[in-house]
Image (cartoon, rainbow, N blue to C red):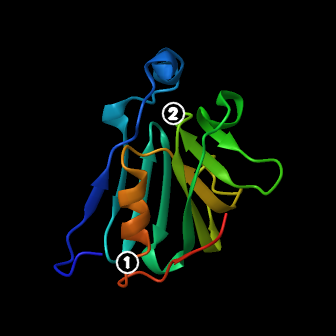
Amino acid sequence: MNHDGETRRFGFAFEDRYRPLLRLLGIRPDTCELTLSDDLLRVRFGPWLVLSPRGNVAGAELSGPYSAVKAIGPRLSLADGGLTFGSTTRQGVCIRFHRSVSGSEPLGVLRHPALTVTVEEPARLLGALLSPHGAAQRTAT
């Protein structure tokens, strides 16, 4: 993280061909943002929101490319319960948590061990998550 405690902001990368579908769900560039401070990870994806203490981030890695069926929109992995906020099939960052987070439904009943986000600058986000000021560690893919 920055030494001055600055909050880093990351917009989501949108592929034009998926914009009409995502817009129907309330997912547009102006309704999607990931912010990362020394204390908090906040991800807004249209009407969906994930909040986690920064210290809850266990690790992160680049992932992708993805198939559209598995990556576009808010997606729940039936294999591991992970959540995806996807706006492109190109590349994203998979963020793993020590304690599972809520965010896929309004009651917070479902919990997710990981969140994949398709931000505009995935390598920059990965660097911010893995910086010495955070507790996250890179894992092999």
Question: In the image, what residue occupies the spot 56% across and 73% down?
Answer: 59
Question: In the image, what residue occupies the spot 64% across and 61% down?
Answer: 114
| Front-most of residues 88 and 107 | 88
Check the image and name the residue furthest to the left. Answer: 4
Q: Which residue is mark 2?
A: 88
Instruction: Give left or right: position of 135 versus 70.
Output: left
| Nearest to N terminus: mark 1 or mark 2 | 2
Q: Position of residue 75 (x, y in %)?
A: 66, 40
Three-letter residue code for mark 2: Thr
| Front-most of residues 29 and 88 | 88
Crowd class of label 2 (few under 14; some 14 to 19; many from 20; radius 10 Å): many
Three-letter residue code for mark 1: Ser
Residue 124: which quarter of the image?
bottom left
Q: Position of residue 104 (x, y in %)?
A: 62, 47
Q: Which residue is mark 1?
A: 131
Q: Is residue 68 above or below residue 93?
A: above
Instruction: Give the Cα distance between marks 1 and 2.
Output: 25 Å
At mark 2, the secondary structure is loop
Q: Position of residue 134 (x, y in %)?
A: 41, 81
Question: In the image, what residue occupies the spot 37% across and 43% down?
Answer: 120
Q: Position of residue 1 (x, y in %)?
A: 30, 75
| Residue 104 tag number | none
